[in-house]
Amino acid sequence: MKRLLNVLIISLLMMFVLLLPRADAGKSADGFPVGGALNYGEYGRPATLDPITSNDMISLRIVELLFNGLVGIDAKQEIVPELAERWEIAEDGRIYTFFLRKDVFWHAREGEDSVPFTADDVIFTYNVIMHPNTITPLKVRNEFIATVTKSDDHTVVFTLKRPILNALAKFSFKIIPKHGPQNPEFLTREDPFVQNPIGTGAYMLKNVTADREAILVANEKYFKGRPHIDKYIARPFADQNIMGQALMFNAIDMIVLVNHRDIPQLQGDKRFVLQPYNALSYSFFGFNLRNPMLADKRVRMAFTYAINRQEMLDSFFQGQGTIISGPFAPGSWAYNLDVQPVPYDLQKATALLNEAGFTKSGDGIMEKDGKALTLTLKVPIAKESEAVKRVVLAFKNYLAKVGVEIEPEFQEWLSWKEDVFQNHDFDIVFASWVFDDSADISSLFHSAEIGPWKNNFGAFSNPEVDSLIVESKLTLDHEKRRTINRKLHKIIADENPYTFLWTLTNYAGYNKKLRRVAIHPYKFFSFADEWYIPESEQR
């Protein structure tokens, strides 16, 4: 009986201990709670999910959660260790030796064990990027590297063709696993890896739904420590108005880029935080110079004179932006403030079209050699945002005043990308660029970047521009590089391959339950492993 009583007392004590709250339950090493899910809205769907073929911001934001570089950039814009725990730079500035972490593992595929990260993965990534059959904007950014070798499994040595400015920051490109892609030599958009990648990042891709909703779960083995939030869900929207309503009705927790028309509503709602972030970006109308009509600079310049950009900015974006004049992101040290935006001048636009040989026909449309100046304008997303619809309609109406007929065509995001980047089936596009390196415009305007899935989709080619872009990369003198880029700005503004429009002030909107939210201006989710949701608000 006594033994039975002892057992009963011990059992009761064990139950009591189990019922006591654990001091570390639901907490991470830094004391902040773990758990919960973050549903965020994206305006469109990701095309690819790997860091090499991806060239749209929706994809690159997901990539930031999945992958790491040798180095990273912190909130103070300073270079910090990531996959490399330290590095050494030779006195001549040509040899960079990276000493890799030994506690990094690749995300495990279902039914497989985690594989350690090694120097072979770094070498593999570089070779894939530079392979002629890999179409990636990273190729031109890494052409300064001559060779990559390893001293051992955790030491990798980069030898540069020449010393360059800010070289260390360029090693932030994401590393992919040697055992990841199906093809061991190069990466294409047909490789299964680009839709089902594995990385070393804070989050792992669980699956992508038929609607392209990407579901990411916390990486328990993350070398920086398990991230706080259990799950990130990227929900695509084809209509910004619906996305805004989804946030207001708590169907999602965050919008990475708030529609400017929704800003006043969010500002007046205490449930949400509206956080500005200064991305290096701008919007533009881009011309396909393969079209003989648009190959004439006078025609392109006439289009720019014909539209009232300030009126559009004020009317459709509440004036929350700045009109720009050229190819560098405003706010960048490379931007040439001496080059003024082209003014609104219908008479000048008409004169330029006449000078190019166009005259108005009986129906009021400009024509040349019996061919009417009628052009297609392709805009991504079938159910476009109201603001962009208005911009497109205004563009059409402005140009109608000088006898140019514009036929807008709204397309689903992936179809638009195929028409523009792959098939070059367009006359004019409306789009935006967001920059991680404000002074590197080589992938946009160098003639070597003309081709399928490359960023110079308008086929702009100018030998002087090519030469200046190369010279800018070669110089080690910052002031000389600034002078070169100012000249580049002036030439490209004069050539007018785009009608440069404006840079807008970006805002993220999110439910106030999200805490410690710090936003990277380009990659957005760089610090997302530190965000958290209080236990009382997790669902």
Image (tube, rainbow, N blue to C red):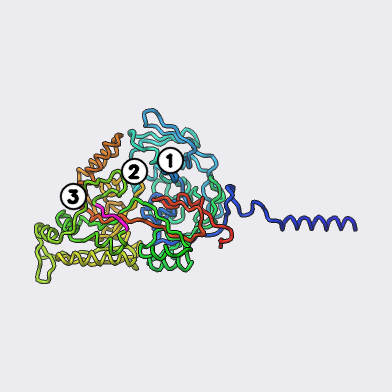
Q: Which of marks 1 and 2 is in front?
A: 1
Which residue in the structure is indicated by mark 2?
141
Picture disc at residue 79? 1
- The answer for how far apart the CA atoms under marks 1 and 3 are is 36 Å
Q: What residue type is labelled 1?
A: Ile
Q: Say if the magenta span includes residue 89.
A: no
Callout 2 touching callout 3 (CB < 8 Å): no
Residue 339 in the image: x percent, y percent?
A: 21, 48
| Crowding near the residue tagged with mark 3, few <14, some 14–19, many ≥20 C-alpha atoms within 10 Å | some
| Crowding near the residue tagged with mark 2, few <14, some 14–19, many ≥20 C-alpha atoms within 10 Å | some
Q: Quadrant of residue 440?
A: top left
Callout 1 touching callout 2 (CB < 8 Å): no
Which residue in the structure is indicated by mark 3?
494
Q: Which of the two residues, 22 or 158, is positioned nearer the viewer here?
A: 22
- The answer for how far apart the CA atoms under marks 1 and 2 are is 18 Å
Which is nearer the N-term, disc 2 or disc 3?
2
Q: Which amino acid does label 2 sit on?
A: Arg
The residue under the point 83% across, 56% down is 7
Q: Is residue 184 above or below residue 387?
A: above
Which is nearer the N-term, disc 1 or disc 3?
1
Q: Nearer the viewer, mark 2 or mark 3?
A: 3
Q: Which of the two residues, 228 or 161, is positioned nearer the viewer here?
A: 228
Tag 2 secondary structure = helix
Tag 3 secondary structure = helix
Dividing the image into 4 quarters, which one contains the N terminus? Answer: bottom right
440 with respect to 346 (left or right): right
What span is in magenta?
320-324
